[in-house]
Structures are given as C-alpha cells and as structure tokens.
Image (tube, rainbow, N blue to C red):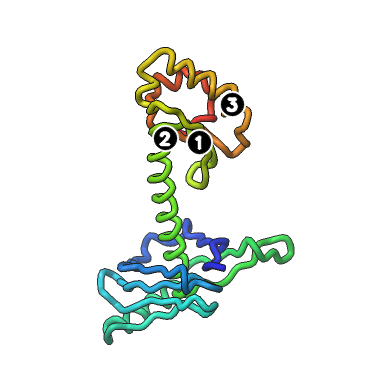
C-alpha cells in the first residue's frame, strides 16, 4: 500500500487570517522501498525557511521530520500547532454510523497528503506526455488523466485532417468503432485536432475532452 490516497483534506473553510506556508522541495520517492507506505525523503520549508528533512521509510511507520537547527525546530513546533487547527482528515474507507470517519489533522498527515498530491501531479504529467506522443498518429479514447486506448493510423492525424477523405475516414471510424466502445466515464482525448474539424466529425456533446 501507499500513503492512503483515500484520505483527503477538507480545507475550504480554513480562515484566511491563518498564514503558514509549508512546502516540500527536492522530493525523492523510492518505489523499491515502498512497501506498506510510500518511501520518500524531502526538504521541508516553513514560511520560506529551510526547516529540516522529512522522510518515510516505507515500512508502515509514520512520516518523520527532523529540524536543521533551532529555528527549524521552532517552525516545526508552530507548524504542528497550526495543523491541529485545520479541519480533520476524512477516511472514506472507514464508515461509522453511516458517515466517513475522521482523524484530527497532524503535521505528518499534512505532509503525507502533500506527497500524495505531488505523486498524482507526476502521474498526470506522465499520462499527458504519453498521450501527446500517441495522438500524433492515433485517435485516443479513455478516462481523462487515467488511461486510454488508441486507434492508430499510418498517416499522422495532422495530415489526415488536411484532406477531405481523411476527415471522412476519421468521422466514420469514430462513429462506427470508437463511440460504440465508450463507457460513461470515457471520452475522446485528442487535443491536436482543431475545433472546426471536431465539428465536422459530428461527435456528440460531452464525448470529446475539452
């Protein structure tokens, strides 16, 4: 397991008067060492000051943080108090009396969520890069940001949409092959086809990512 991505932070009601900036830099995640939790190490900055090091060893234990100096230790103590004033974590996987259970926020939980956000961002970037490569010669369809399938062509998509026959070929393939396979949460994912060409393809509303 990884740090439980079913934990989410409810932050919409945090008072604007509270000001504490917590950032992680130099993040390194080890898939090899990640067993029961995500193994990582990062540099912790609090209010712009390099406060110390944050780490989780991937064996199921809590995330730990070590100050660099006295100022770092002071800022960590302040960050702990600040986190305890935040809304609790909500566990969607634990239901008590019909409601998701909650856990009081702590600094280590807050840092865990920052790592999960960082990992999700990296996953989205990898997905986008792979999709951009495939869509040069394919019509992509799937769940945005998660997975896709590809209907590939010999010619690049950019060349096909410059020809009437190419546009008609895409239109027929999309209607006869792609749309019948789309699940409710799936869309056509190509972002390399102009809007005016998409109109010619006559794809139903909501079936093209955008």
Query: Mark 3 packing: few (<14 Cα in 10 Å), some, or many (20+)?
Result: few
Q: Earlier in the sequence, mark 2 or mark 3?
A: 2
Residue 59: percent from the left, percent from the top? 52, 78
Whole-number angstrom distance, CA of label 1 to CA of label 3: 11 Å
Q: Which residue is mark 2?
A: 135
Query: Do the residues under discs 1 and 3 have CB atoms within 8 angstroms?
Result: no
Looking at the picture, tell me which residue is in the foreground, 135 or 115: 135
Q: Secondary structure at mark 1?
A: strand
Residue drawn at point x = 73 percent, y = 60 percent: 98
Q: Residues within 10 Å of mark 2 (few under 14, many from 20)?
A: many
The reply to whether discs 1 and 2 touch (Cβ–Cβ < 8 Å) is yes
Question: Which is more N-terminal, label 2 or label 1?
Answer: 2
Residue 100 percent location from the top left of the image: 65, 62
Q: Earlier in the sequence, mark 1 or mark 3?
A: 1
Question: On the image, numbered disc 3 is attached to which residue?
Answer: 177
The mark found on residue 150 in the picture is 1
How far apart are the alpha carbons under marks 1 and 2?
8 Å
Horizontal arrangement in the rendering, residue 168 relative to residue 163 (left or right):
right
The answer to whether one can see residue 121 in this image is: yes
Pointer 1: residues within 10 angstroms few (<14), some, or many (20+)?
some
Could you say where residue 112 lies in the image, as x and y percent from the top left? Answer: 46, 69
Picture residue at 41% right of the left edge, 54% below the top? 121
């Amino acid at each position: 397991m990884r740090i439980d991505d079913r934990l989410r932070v409810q932050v919409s009601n945090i008072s604007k008067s509270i000001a504490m900036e917590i950032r992680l830099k130099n993040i390194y995640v080890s898939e090899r060492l990640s067993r029961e939790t995500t193994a990582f190490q990062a540099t912790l900055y609090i209010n712009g000051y390099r406060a110390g090091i944050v780490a989780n060893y991937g064996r199921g234990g809590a995330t730990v943080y070590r100050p660099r100096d006295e100022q770092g230790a002071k800022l960590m103590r302040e960050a702990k108090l600040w986190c305890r004033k935040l809304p609790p974590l909500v566990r969607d996987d634990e239901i008590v009396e019909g409601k998701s259970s909650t856990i009081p926020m702590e600094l280590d939980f807050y840092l865990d969520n920052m790592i999960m956000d960082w990992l999700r961002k990296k996953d989205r970037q990898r997905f986008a890069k792979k999709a951009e490569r495939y869509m040069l010669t394919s019509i992509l369809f799937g769940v945005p940001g998660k997975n896709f399938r590809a209907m590939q062509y010999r010619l690049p998509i950019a060349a096909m949409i410059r020809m009437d026959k190419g546009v008609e070929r895409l239109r027929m393939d999309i209607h006869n092959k792609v749309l019948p396979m789309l699940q409710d949460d799936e869309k056509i994912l190509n972002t390399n086809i102009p809007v005016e060409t998409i109109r010619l393809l006559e794809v139903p509303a909501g079936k093209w990512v955008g």
